[in-house]
């Protein structure tokens, strides 16, 4: 049994090192010349993805990937990663506040045309559906069919809304 415990400790140490290395590279972005930033962002992302490969149940690397996406003005990608962080087995608690910040920021900006408003509204509905679907994720096997139906509903709702077709709940 001690060998397994040592392996768990080793994996945890490797995971932490990879997250820390990703963080260090993320901080380095601020100090780098603009020509190097894309390269450094790629390295940082690689460390976070490697951390997830070591321990896919952790939400922190997803949160850090969301922060990187925000620094690249990729709001939708950031939202995706914050949701992944929040729905991980070991969710990263600060991701909820970070997600709220990014959503509040986008809601406070002037939306210039009707199409952008429609996309924003549909995205909000999609997020609601995803959060609901995720809240049903850990139900017992008896409720597995209901979970599947919720996921199917969210996917169909997303597809219809972004295709511009009405979809009733």
Image (cartoon, rainbow, N blue to C red):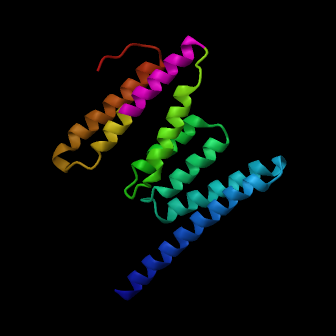
Is residue 43 placed above or below 144 in the rendered structure?
Answer: below
Specify the quadrant that holds the N terminus: bottom left
Is residue 105 placed above or below 45 in the rendered structure?
Answer: above
Horizontal side of residue 62 vs 43, given as left or right: left
Residue 74 visible in this rendered orientation of the protein: yes
Q: Residue most toward the left?
A: 142
Is residue 25 placed above or below 99 in the rendered structure?
Answer: below
Of 59 and 149, nearer the camera is 59
Is residue 105 placed above or below 71 in the rendered structure?
Answer: above
* x then y, percent, for residue 79: 51, 39
Which residue corresponds to the image point at 37% horizontal and 24% vertical from the top-left?
A: 157
Which residue corresponds to the image point at 51% horizontal and 61% vertical from the top-left?
A: 53
* x then y, percent, for residue 15: 52, 68
The residue range painted magenta reads 113-128
Specify the quadrant that holds the C terminus: top left
What type of secondary structure mainly makes up the magenta span? helix
Q: Residue most toward the bottom?
A: 2
* x then y, percent, for residue 41: 70, 52
Which residue corresponds to the image point at 35% horizontal and 30% vertical from the top-left?
A: 154
Which residue corresponds to the image point at 55% horizontal and 14% vertical from the top-left?
A: 115
Q: Is residue 117 shown in magenta?
A: yes
Horizontal side of residue 169 vs 36, given as left or right: left
Residue 84 visible in this rendered orientation of the protein: no
Q: Please count the marks in the image.
A: 0
* x then y, percent, for residue 132: 31, 37
């Amino acid at each position: 049994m001690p060998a397994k415990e040592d392996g768990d400790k080793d994996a945890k140490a490797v995971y932490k090192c990879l997250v820390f290395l990703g963080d260090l590279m993320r901080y380095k972005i601020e100090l780098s010349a603009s020509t190097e930033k894309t390269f450094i962002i790629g390295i940082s992302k690689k460390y976070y993805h490697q951390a997830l490969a070591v321990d896919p149940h952790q939400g922190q690397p997803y949160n850090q990937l969301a922060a990187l996406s925000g620094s690249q003005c990729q709001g939708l990608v950031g939202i995706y990663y914050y949701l992944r962080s929040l729905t991980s087995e070991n969710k990263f608690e600060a991701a909820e506040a970070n997600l709220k910040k990014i959503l509040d920021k986008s809601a406070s900006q002037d939306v210039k045309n009707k199409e952008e408003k429609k996309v924003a509204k549909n995205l909000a509905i999609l997020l609601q559906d995803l959060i609901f679907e995720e809240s049903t994720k850990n139900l017992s096997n008896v409720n597995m069919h209901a979970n599947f139906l919720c996921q199917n509903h969210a996917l169909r709702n997303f597809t219809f809304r972004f295709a511009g077709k009405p979809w009733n709940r």
